[in-house]
Amino acid sequence: MHPLRTDDPLERKQVNFFLFTLRCILELLILFSLCFCLRFVYHLQNLPQEPELSLARILETGILPVVTRNSLHSYYIYNGNEMGFEYELVKTLADQLELKLDIEVADSMEEMEEALSQGRAAIAIPGVPVQEQSLFRTTQPYMHMELELVVHRSNIQVQSKEDIEGMRIHVPTGSDSYILLRHLQDDGLDIELVEENLLAEELFAKVAAREIEGTVIPGHMARRYQRYYPQALPAFTLGRPAPFVWMIHPEAHRLHYTINRFFDNILKDGIFETLYNHHYRNLDLFDYVDLMRFHNRLKTRLPRYQHLFEKYSELHGFDWRLIAAQSYQESHFNPWARSHANARGLMQLMPRTARSLGVTNVHDPEQSIEAGVRYLKNLHNIFYLAEEPHRTYKALGSYNVGQGHMYDARALARRFGLDPNRWYNMEKMLPLLEKKEYYKDATYGYCRGSEPVIYLKKIMLYYDIIRHKSLLESRKLPPE
């Protein structure tokens, strides 16, 4: 007999009820499962889709597209080479990922945001502290900089917030400077605030030319721009240090993680410090009177000899602006200059060195420049194991102090376990040769080791200014 068949009407009703209940439960379970599946499919469809420029896609193409602004801090082209602090940062990232950079230049924050949203760029680098973005994800800050009020040198009495009452202050559009000053306005500070779609350097130049009363920009930029426009100066700090970040697509999760890890690593291993120092160290090596004299002599004296610097620098593979900067440090472009050690001429050649180079008249500008550049090239050839710019730095240091003392400094570096082919290690070792405990065992003895360190710093200061002048003239940066 079938187990569910029965002649008892009561039992039959109970069995039917049981079957009905079981069927209902099964149908409910099936309906619930279908609802769950439909909801899950809907959820999957509405998950954030991986952007076109995801890290996987970038690695597949081998190209890292970046958008930034054309500025001295972020990105510019000099002598056909791409440069800028932010450029070197993102280039380091690209090199580590074995990617090729593709740089797009934008004129505003809006254009950078558009490049991100349209997928033309994976990273946007503002190069300044910016307002918090609601549509775009930002990396962790990789540095913080204080914002400083910049005024004309004639307004040196401006030293606090109370002193700027009634001033009209211009700031870059969309910058942290704007937010900071708006907060000060809300707190009762009586100032007129003007946003301009200009770079920080352009506003600094306008202050120097007395076209505007003041601006607020990051301090490290202000001190560098002061080299080029000495008539303006940072007066005092406003607010808390502002963060610098990069912007990326909000859904590029792996890229976001990779960049943050990159920042963590370069901050720990010293790469960030090295890059930063290359652009912004020695900013306080600044004397207003000397700098104004230098700017004046770029107009009055340099034109007499520029063709000679160009001619012989090109012959030996140097940037003529570097040689001009060295010549100014040596002689202030004075062919009759004579040092206490009897070095003479535009390139301050010692009599013995001049004779060995075939110079018959050390006061003749062409002979002096030709021989000086040739001598520098000989020194440059000696340090062929060093990469640029360390090779050139070592050659310039040897021009000042002699190659023998540079050999001693290199030996000291090895003794301390440092790379002798890096100039920053020479900066540490050369001054030690002034101390008896170190020079007594050195092959070439005592050395005024601090001098070549200062010598190179001043040359690089002058070189930076001459190079910047050339950039402006070539319209690679906005005009003054």
Image (cartoon, helix red, strand yellow):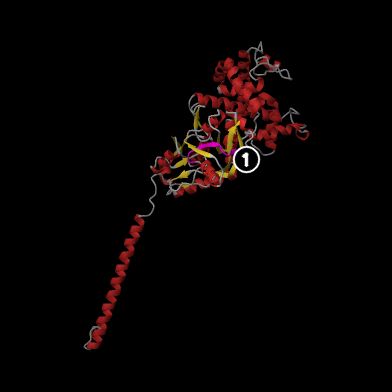
Q: Is residue 109 left or right of residue 447?
A: left
Towards the viewer: 471 or 230:
230
- Where residue 237 sits: x, y (%)? 61, 40
Q: Which residues are magenta?
A: 160-174
Q: Is residue 423 above or below residue 321?
A: below
State the image quarter where residue 380 is shown: top right
Q: Is residue 51 left or right of residue 296?
A: left
Front-most of 74 and 380? 74
Q: Nearer the viewer, residue 10 or 7?
A: 10
Q: Is residue 162 magenta?
A: yes
In the image, residue 26 above or below residue 254: below
Q: Say what amino acid the circle numbered 1 marks.
A: Ser
Residue annotated with mark 1 = 160
- In the picture, which quadrant includes the N terminus? bottom left
Quadrant in the rendering for residue 123? top left
Residue 127 visible in this rendered orientation of the protein:
no
**What residue is shown at x 48% (from left), y 26% (from top)?**
475
Res. 229 visible in picture: yes
**Residue 356 image position (x, y, % from top left):** 67, 15
Task: List the single residue furthest toward the top.
Answer: 360
Residue ranking furthest to the bottom? 8
Mark 1 element type: loop
**Residue 98 painted magenta:** no
How far across and down, in percent of the image, does residue 99 sit?
Answer: 46, 39
Q: Nearer the viewer, residue 445 or 432?
A: 432
Q: Relative to 431, is 145 on the left or the right?
A: left
* Mark 1 burial class by Cα count in 10 Å: few <14, some 14-19, many 20+: few
Q: Position of residue 36 (x, y in %)?
A: 34, 64
Q: Quadrant of residue 236?
A: top right
